[in-house]
Amino acid sequence: MATLTEAPPPPTPTAPEKKPPRRRGRFTPYWLLLPGILWLLVFFALPMIYQASTSVQTGSLEEGYKVTWHFVTYWDALSGYWPQFLRSVAYAAAATVLCLLLGYPLAYLIAFRAGRWRNLIMILVIAPFFTSFLIRTLAWKTILADGGPVVGALNTLHVLDVTNWLGWTAGDRVLATPLAVVCGLTYNFLPFMILPLYTSLERIDGRLHEAAGDLYAKPWVTFRKVTFPLSMPGVVSGTLLTFIPAAGDYVNADLLGSTDTRMIGNVIQTQFLRILDYPTAAALSFILMAAILIMVTFYIRRSGTEDLV
Amino acid sequence: MALVNWLKRHLVVIAGLLTLGYLLLPNVVVTVFSFNKPKGRFNYAWQQFSTDAWKDPCGVSDLCGSLSVSLQIAFWATLGATALGTLIAFALVRYRFRARGAVNSLIFLPMAMPEVVMAASLLTLFLNMGAQLGFWTILIAHIMFCLSFVVTAVKARVMSMDPRLEQAAQDLYAGPVQTFVRVTLPIAAPGIAAGALLAFALSFDDFIITNFNAGSTVTFPMFVWGSAQRGTPVQINVIGTAMFLVAVLLVLASMVVGNRRNRQKA
């Protein structure tokens, strides 16, 4: 997170590449890269290959597994678990939109309106990270408890009637419904939206706002035509940083949801750790990875900001 | 009318503060419920005020043991990831080499991958190699996913460094080692520190990857997860509150020190 809040490096006036060649050998960069890259190759890239191979194996725990190019596993996994896939995408998308709607005003407040409170608010945004996210997610069980003040208020305001009709809640309960899961996902990944938004808002030259005002733009028009377009890099990286972990998450669905809110992460976890059906689990995980990579690539292309890395 | 205008002008501020409230509400609940005396096994409903848990934070079996496992893993993972990541960051900023694009994607991909995918594939590797799941497999996994974040943090700092400072040091007859230790490293230090801090926080709080690769080793997040099924002791809230307070105090202290230093410079 600290990386996202850090000021962007200013364009270096002197091209560092044109420095006089160093006496250190030309293999130096490779030696510097070697240990870290080796670590990533062995413990990140190689596991992906193992997983791909596991997904087309057949066999059993007792007799061992063999690669039989059994692609049917993929078909079975998709046809068996498509509701969970769809649910993951839907919940993650809903949480991402909510994060954007909730996070934008706060990022804007920190960047332009906070004045001397800026550092304090910044600390308050980051500080929750230091309490384990599982403990904080469990706190939502208390907040959304049946018959508690939040549920009572929603009931009196007839919000629950609307959400019941939409199928987001059931009866007088919020816990164990899709609404609770989305609420938990939104809460957990909100800082990942706020920090990149803040970074790109903070870069905007305040004089642009004045210029827009001088040209008789109303505040809303200034926001729509100047501020928001300039904050697009933050919007793109914020939505990615929210959507990707939310789509693979199973903690919120498990703690705040019910069996009807299981996401694909829950399925992968159960298949891997309880049912021990490794080929199916590997296939599901592979599909999730491919789906996310395709969606992310498409999204980055569409939004035209490719310099995220 | 005046009220409507006031609301209009401060709409962003109000909305922003509401979001801040949403972010902090769970922490308030965690703190308040650390003083609860629950009736059953679960600490979800308020019963009565008590400081029992604060007097005996290790009163639940395995809780403080899991905390110490987590701290150890976070410490070594931070050390490993920071060392490896800093080397990569320097290579990326300071040198031209082949396969730069491939290296960049290899560093970006772990950050763009859902945790559950990395967790599951790493478990496949460990199972295939017949590795004994436990402390070491958790440590390996944590170094792996912290590495990319360290690289990004250090890279940002090294990139904004003025290369002329090092040239000046060399003009003043500093050798390569001396230049690195006396000039480069101190300037890069804030970036390295930020990366290390991030790695520590990520490793300490990680649940999903740990859950897959822990075997029977129990870290603090794993303990909390287990207690969510079996019954949540109040001591969990005590630890959570204490961690929050320590972190906020540390940040405030570092800010005060930083301000004083800036004032002295000015």
Image (spheres, rainbow, N blue to C red):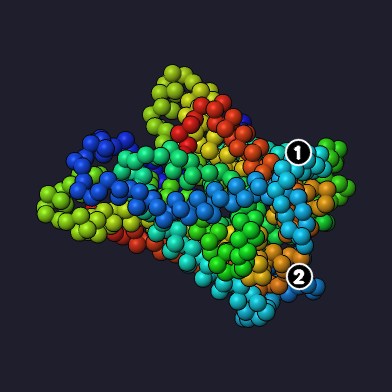
**Quadrant of res A247:** top right
Query: Which element carries disc 2, helix, strand or loop?
Result: loop
Tell me the subunit letter for badge 1. A
Q: Which mark is residue B231?
A: 2
Residue A228 x %, y %: 52, 29
Residue at image position (39%, 61%) is: B254
Q: Amino acid at mark 2?
A: Gly
Residue A237 x %, y %: 53, 38
Residue at image position (38%, 50%) is: A33
Question: Distance between the Cα atoms at labels 2 and 1?
Answer: 32 Å
Viewer-proximal residue among A107 and A279: A279
**Quadrant of res A26:** top left
Viewer-proximal residue among A294 and A52: A52
Residues at circles 2 and 1 in contact by the CB criterion of under 8 Å: no
Q: Which mark is residue B105?
A: none
Instruction: Work out which residue is located at the far top of the displayed protein and give it.
Output: A215
Query: Taking A137 as reference, is A78 above or below it?
Result: above
Residue at image position (78%, 57%) is: A60
Tell me the subunit letter for badge 2. B
Query: Taking B64 as reference, is A12 above or below it?
Result: above
Viewer-proximal residue among B141 and A38: A38
Do discs 2 and 1 share a chain? no
Q: Which mark is residue A86?
A: 1
Query: Taking A251 as reference, is A77 above or below it?
Result: above
Image label count: 2
Query: Which element carries disc 1, helix, strand or loop?
Result: helix
